[in-house]
């Protein structure tokens, strides 16, 4: 009976190590408490996994959607008529991917040792405290009064600050940098993200103008031939 269960399980999730996935997901709690040792072991000792990183990012998105939609209105004011889950999804995923690409592009020129997957994994694991605190804040928002709402935003800020600190620790350990170099590389990564967004906007504007030009040209030719 046990043998048939194992065959079925391995047939559906072929080559997937559930035990390692469980341990790597639980390891995110260790990186919260001991980030320097945690992020080093995460990458260099193989304590992390991409599956766990994907899970953390997915949970971060789900928690943010719930925080915006389920929280008390005194904490989060939301207009459901204009709310779009896709926007929340993009607001988390796009900055994450931009950071990964920009940081990897720069750190390869600065003797950084991290790969694209390593940077993504480190960023994902750094989201853990922010996600946990935001999840706790959802029921808390229904308990606090209007006069106590400052506590809500204080803990929200703690979660964001914790996330930023873990990102710096992750960049330090992933690329084997000093703290000063990790901070510097993170700052220029933000600048690089701004440059990437600017180039994308310019490219989109040029492509849009080109499309509109050819559309208007086609319409004029069509009008003349009628």
Image (spheres, rainbow, N blue to C red):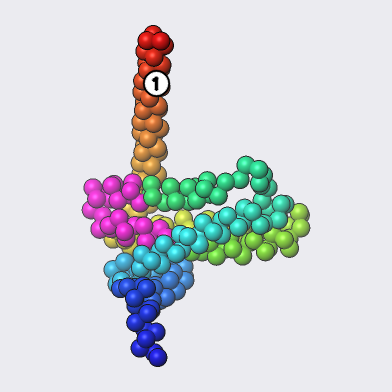
Q: Is residue 139 above or below residue 223?
A: below
User: Is residue 122 left or right of 63 when viewed as pictured?
Assistant: left
- The residue drawn where x is 38% and y is 42% is 193
| Prevalent SS, magenta region | helix
- The residue drawn where x is 71% and y is 56% is 72
Residue sitting farthest toward the front: 226
| Helix, strand or loop under label 1 | helix
Dividing the picture into quadrants, the one containing residue 122 is bottom left
x, y percent for residue 221:
36, 13
x, y percent for residue 32:
46, 68
Question: Is residue 29 among the parts visible in the rendering?
Answer: yes
x, y percent for residue 16:
34, 73
- Residue stretch rendered in magenta on the structure: 100-126
User: Is residue 8 left or right of 136 when viewed as pictured?
Assistant: left
Q: Nearer the viewer, residue 76 or 189?
A: 76
Residue under pointer 1: 215
Image quadrant containing the C terminus: top left
**Residue 123 located within the stretch drawn in magenta:** yes
**Residue 159 located within the stretch drawn in magenta:** no
Dividing the picture into quadrants, the one containing residue 26 is bottom left
Residue sitting farthest toward the bottom: 1
- The residue drawn where x is 39% and y is 14% is 222
- The residue drawn where x is 23% and y is 47% is 109
Q: Nearer the viewer, residue 186 or 71?
A: 71
Q: Residues within 10 Å of mark 1 (few under 14, many from 20)?
A: few
């Amino acid at each position: 009976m046990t043998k048939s269960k194992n065959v079925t399980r391995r047939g559906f999730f072929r080559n997937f190590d559930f035990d390692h996935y469980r341990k790597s997901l639980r390891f995110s709690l260790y990186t919260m408490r001991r980030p320097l040792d945690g992020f080093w072991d995460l990458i260099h000792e193989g304590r992390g996994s991409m599956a766990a990183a994907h899970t953390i990012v997915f949970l971060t998105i789900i928690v943010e959607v719930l925080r915006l939609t389920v929280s008390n209105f005194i904490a989060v004011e939301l207009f459901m008529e204009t709310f779009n889950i896709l926007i929340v999804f993009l607001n988390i995923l796009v900055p994450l991917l931009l950071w990964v690409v920009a940081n990897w592009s720069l750190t390869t020129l600065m003797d950084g040792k991290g790969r694209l997957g390593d940077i993504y994994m480190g960023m994902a694991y750094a989201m853990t405290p922010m996600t946990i605190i935001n999840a706790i804040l959802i029921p808390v928002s229904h308990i606090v009064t209007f006069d106590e709402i400052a506590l809500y935003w204080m803990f929200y800020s703690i979660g964001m600050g914790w996330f930023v600190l873990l990102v710096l620790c992750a960049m330090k350990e992933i690329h084997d940098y000093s703290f000063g170099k990790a901070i510097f590389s993170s700052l220029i990564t933000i600048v690089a993200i701004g440059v990437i967004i600017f180039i994308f906007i310019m490219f989109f504007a040029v492509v849009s103008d080109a499309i509109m030009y050819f559309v208007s040209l086609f319409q004029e030719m069509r009008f003349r031939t009628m």
